[in-house]
Image (cartoon, helix red, strand yellow):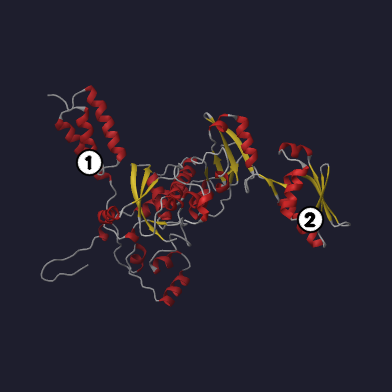
Amino acid sequence: MTGVSPETIRSEVRKLRGEVPDSVVEELERTLLRVGKERAITAEALQRVIEAVKEAHLSSLVEPGEAVGTVAAQSIGEPGTQMTLRTFHYAGVAELNVTLGLPRLIEILDTRRTPSAALMTVYLEPPYSKDKDKARAIAQEIEMTTVEDLISEMETDLMNMQLLLSLSRSRLRQKELTPSKVKEVLSRELGPKVEINVEETKLRIKAAESLSELRRLAARVRKIKLKGVKDVTKVVVKKEGEEWVIYTEGSNFAEILKMKGVDKKRTTTNNIREIEEILGIEAARNALIREMSSTLREQGLEVDIRHIMLVADMMTVKGEVRQIGRHGVSGEKSSVLARAAFEITLKHLLEASLRGEEDRLRGVTESIITGNPIPLGTGSVRLVMQGGRSERE
Amino acid sequence: MGGRMSEELDPRGHVLVPEHRVLSKEEGEEVLRRYRVKPHQLPLIKSSDPVARAIGAKPGDIVEIKRESFTAGRALAYRYVVEG
């Protein structure tokens, strides 16, 4: 008995496409081709294998009516009890401050507009990624420098109603700035009415009329950005494999992507909101999955990716990232009773009655409250009778 | 597409962004038939979404997304474009 040709294996296996996932099709094809080289596979055996794969796939699918949401909640919730409660941790990447464990997971699910420790991973394009000094130069350009970072001393001269700034020479050199350059930025920021004089490394700023105004000016001057990308407070250059990568504390995804030398295809941030805004809802979904699973994995917890994908799907299903909770997934349920059962019961019931809302009692929560069978598993099936007296639904 | 578009970056090609494609009327109807759903029962995508704008998706369109799935290799997903 002779075996089938590799072409037959390929064409037969590929007929499975659409019926089973691509990854299964590819793996089956690879395996069959390898085995086919060692010994002959008869046409009959090939069909048997394909049928067996189809059946195995079918039997591993989630059954209709399975409570996938509840299973996902428990599968993430239980390992969650073992996570660290400590908010901050200096881990892995040099001296960068990252949020880990449960606080980070909560932050992702709440999709806070500004994560407590925003972080960007900035990849560089070839000439810059290969050379440490070139990568350093970009890092210098990215790091935000404010007046506060440069001054060794700041005096408020009440006699003459002026501010006296002493700039540190070493810090100026480190940031590649000069007193005249600082003056230039200051006069642009403060407007033409403010008089600024430079004497070596001392700056005299004269503008204020009253004491309170002088104080306000002092506070404002401290925060003025001299160079760099807004909100990026710290940069670390690190070699990863063959290339130099910049890690930043503080995130400003939109600005960083505009910079020359930055790889616009791989650079990312851990701020989901920024990803949603700049790369869209599908990228946000991917980022949510990535962030959640890496947070769990980092704590040594194995949670099946399917549970995490379900959470990410629920959070992005409306076309924008919604948090899990009062202002998002749970708070926007269509059933009044389900919402009332989650949080602030009275408010939900009151508002619903004011608006004359209707509850179809179709969900799990409502069914439990009203003592009806829940629409899960066998409960999700309705019988339709046909015959003398037919009834719809 | 407003004037903001010019200085905006094209999100397509980023590692986090899967391939999006606007389906034709017929393809869209076929998807709705296959899953036995009405358009608003699909996951949504706003017409202001950066990728939706890049591919010129209008409210009422159905977008096909080729996801790199963690479990299935590749997976097709659909989103219904809504105003926003």
How far is disc 1 from disc 2 in space, using C-alphas? Answer: 78 Å
Q: Position of residue A267 (x, y in %)?
A: 52, 41
Closer to viewer: mark 1 or mark 2: 2
**Which residue does the image show at 38% across and 67% down from the upper left?**
A335
Which image quadrant: the C terminus of chain B? bottom left
Q: Position of residue A237 (x, y in %)?
A: 60, 35
The residue indicated by pointer 1 is A54
Q: Position of residue B54 (x, y in %)?
A: 44, 50
Which residue type does callout 1 highlight?
Lys
Q: Along the line of sight, which residue is nearer the eye, A151 or A135?
A: A135
**Which residue does the image show at 50% across and 52% down from the upper left?**
B5
Label total for image: 2
Q: Along the line of sight, which residue is nearer the eye, A389 or A312?
A: A312
Chain assignment, label 1: A
Chain assignment, label 2: A
Q: Quadrant of residue A392?
A: bottom left
